[in-house]
Image (cartoon, rainbow, N blue to C red):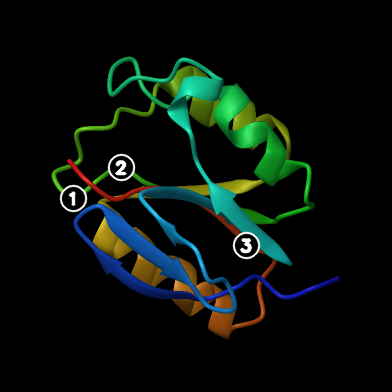
Amino acid sequence: MSASPEISSLSWGQMKVKGCFSTYKDCKVWPGGSRAWDWRETGTQHSPGVQPADLEEVLEKGVDTLVIGRGMTEALQVPSSTLDFVRQRGVEIRVLQTEKAVTEYNNLVGQGAKVGGVFHSTC
């Protein structure tokens, strides 16, 4: 299995993933890849927040831990039903302010963990 890619930079509205030439506003990462997280695909909004459908793609990559970055000011909600959905799959979940979430995610990558994440880089 491929390693999870490190997040190389984060600033308001911009994220870069190591080995990828794109700059993301919001992104999904998993072992072996990354892509933009487009909320329009699932109709996601800050409230009620992250839906199981937003996480399905990352969970299907066989991660043991999922990190969610709720934004710089933690405006993005994560309902308990979404947390339950992840836990029922046997995946550990960590929900943090985005800068802390990126640090946590990169620490797990450095430990060789099978980790995935979804990150919101603005509010």
Q: Nearer the viewer, mark 3 or mark 1?
A: 1
Farthest residue to the bottom: give it: 110
Label 1 residue SS: loop
Tell me which corner region of the image, top left, top right, bottom left or bottom right, holds residue 120. Answer: top left
What is the quadrant of residue 30 in the picture? bottom right
The amino acid type, in three-letter code, at marker 2 is: Arg
**Residue 42 visible here:** yes
Q: Does residue 89 appear to the left or right of 47 in the view shown?
A: right
Query: In the image, which disc is placed on residue 70?
Result: 2
Graded by Cα atoms within 10 Å as few (under 14), some (14 to 19) or many (20 or more), the crowding at tag 1 reads many
Amino acid bearing label 1: Met
What residue is pinned by disc 3? Answer: 115
Q: Residue, x 61% and y 58% (percent of image)?
A: 34
What's the distance in space between the residues labelled 2 and 3, CA to CA?
A: 17 Å
Tag 2 secondary structure? loop
The one of 46 and 78 positioned closer to us in this rendering: 46
> Looking at the image, is 32 positioned above or below residue 13?
below
Q: Residue at x 57, y 71 (%)?
A: 20
Judge whether residue 66 can be spotted in this image: no
Label 3 element class = strand
Write down the residue under mark 1.
72
